[in-house]
Image (cartoon, helix red, strand yellow):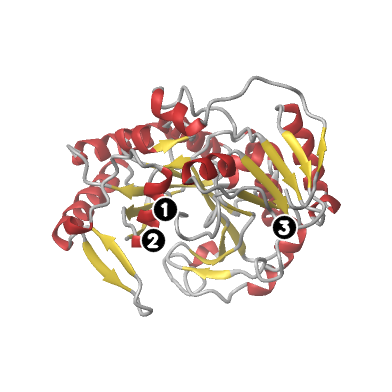
Amino acid sequence: MTDAPHIAPTRTEAPREDPDTLARRLPHGQAAHRPFRPRRVLLTRAARDWPMAARVAERAAAMGAEIVELKGDRITGLKDDDPRAEYRRAKSTLAVTVASDSAMRPEPIPPSADWRFDLATGCPAHCQYCYLAGSLKGPPVTRLFANLPEILDRLPPLEGQGKITSVNAARMAEGTTFEASCYTDPLALEPLSDCLSETISWFGARDADLSLRFTTKFADTATLKAAQHNGRTRARFSVNAEDIARRFEGGTAPLQARLDAMGRLARAGYKVGLTVAPIMPIAEWEAAYDALFAAAARALPPGADVTAELITHRFTPGSREVLLGWYPATDLEMDEAVRTVKRNKFGGRKYVYPAPLMREMREVLEGQVGRHLPNAQLLYWT
């Protein structure tokens, strides 16, 4: 490393197989239902002044991780000419750093919430359709921001200023909403950091009309159940048809474990939700999604406050190139010839399903939500 880091002593353990390779070889859940265990934790100089950095280092070292104290604040040593080698190195590394002033600035995030803010960027899971591909620059390392109090201090002045829930009669009861999982899965990092439970408790203690939203593919909810949420957090679980979850979502909790976690949090008084994404017209997709919503209904207690967000699969030329570099053997359909191209005002392209298929899937899935989860609030289809 160019930073000539000091390497803290660590325990010796047998080399672990790349979790992406392992998730491909074993049935879903056998390889994936462990908490995120980084091989290396990089601590930047600025981050070491924050309590979260010491907490992460102590817990990661107990898991057998190598703890590297960088002399500066640049994250180095991850790049490789081989995209697969770079991917493996980055995905098994957690960088604890400090969010810059610009990174702490909340941004609008329609249609989910009024604003987004970031507890981290990057995700330790291995989803072959990863929405972050092409969105974040450089190797796909997870960067956890240790200066959480500074990040949260930016939020109260935005009360009442959003354009989604703040002005929408159907969702105004949520108050000004803040999305915490746009560029990461915060529950994946919770066992090492407590970043999500601290954020939930912060929102719960506010004397303001603010609420938190996050979505996750993980299921370890013990610290969340103990957090003082006071009804100000909606915990959404990213779910899909069982075959899609099994084939394309390596390193995540099994589908049933996510649904069970949703039920546990609902019984602990949380508002909950289903983020069904990415919806794909796989073989017998109608039956597959019907089974998903039936399983979700069984997991929830009576009277649960639940929402549903329905998001179809799409990709850009840039994300397709990145994903094929990470997962060259994937059988995920990313064929531009069978898709419809949509352009934004800047000339960017994304490929979505043709309009007739989109209409059919929307009609079927919205009907299934209504049948199995009649009290659910359907927020949007996209």
Residue extending farthest top: 14
Judge whether 335 appears above or below 62 on screen: below
Q: Is residue 143 visible?
A: yes
Q: Secondary structure at mark 1?
A: helix
Residue 228 in view, yes or no: no
Answer few, some or many: residues within 10 Å of disc 3's Cα (few below 14, many 20 plus, some between 14 and 19).
some
Marks 2/3 in contact by CB < 8 Å: the verdict is no
Query: Which residue of the protein is positioned furthest toward the front in this rendering?
Result: 81
Q: Decide: marks 1, 3 in contact (CB < 8 A)?
A: no
Task: Give me the residue at 65% from left, 34% from top.
Answer: 39
- Taking depth in this image into account, of 161 and 26 the one nearest to the observer is 26
The CA span between labels 2 and 1 is 6 Å
Q: Residue tagged by mark 3?
A: 74
Question: Which of the labelled discs sits on residue 318, or is there none?
Answer: 2
Report crowding for label 2: few under 14, some 14 to 19, many 20 or more residues within 10 A (C-alpha). Answer: some
Q: Amino acid at mark 3?
A: Arg
Residue 283 in which image quadrant: top left
Cα separation between marks 1 and 3: 23 Å
Per the image, the residue denoted by label 1 is 322
Give the farthest residue toward the right.
Answer: 49
Of mark 2 and mark 3, the one earlier in the sequence is 3
Q: Tell me the amino acid under the disc marked 2.
A: Gly
Q: Position of residue 382 (x, y in %)?
A: 32, 60
Query: Answer yes or no: do the residues labelled 2 and 1 have beta carbons within 8 Å?
Result: yes
Of residues 58 and 361, the one nearer the viewer is 58
Q: Nearer the viewer, residue 43 or 283?
A: 43
Q: Secondary structure at mark 3?
A: loop
Q: Position of residue 60 (x, y in %)?
A: 72, 34
Q: Is residue 374 above or below residue 251?
A: below
Instruction: Give amino acid for label 1.
Output: Val
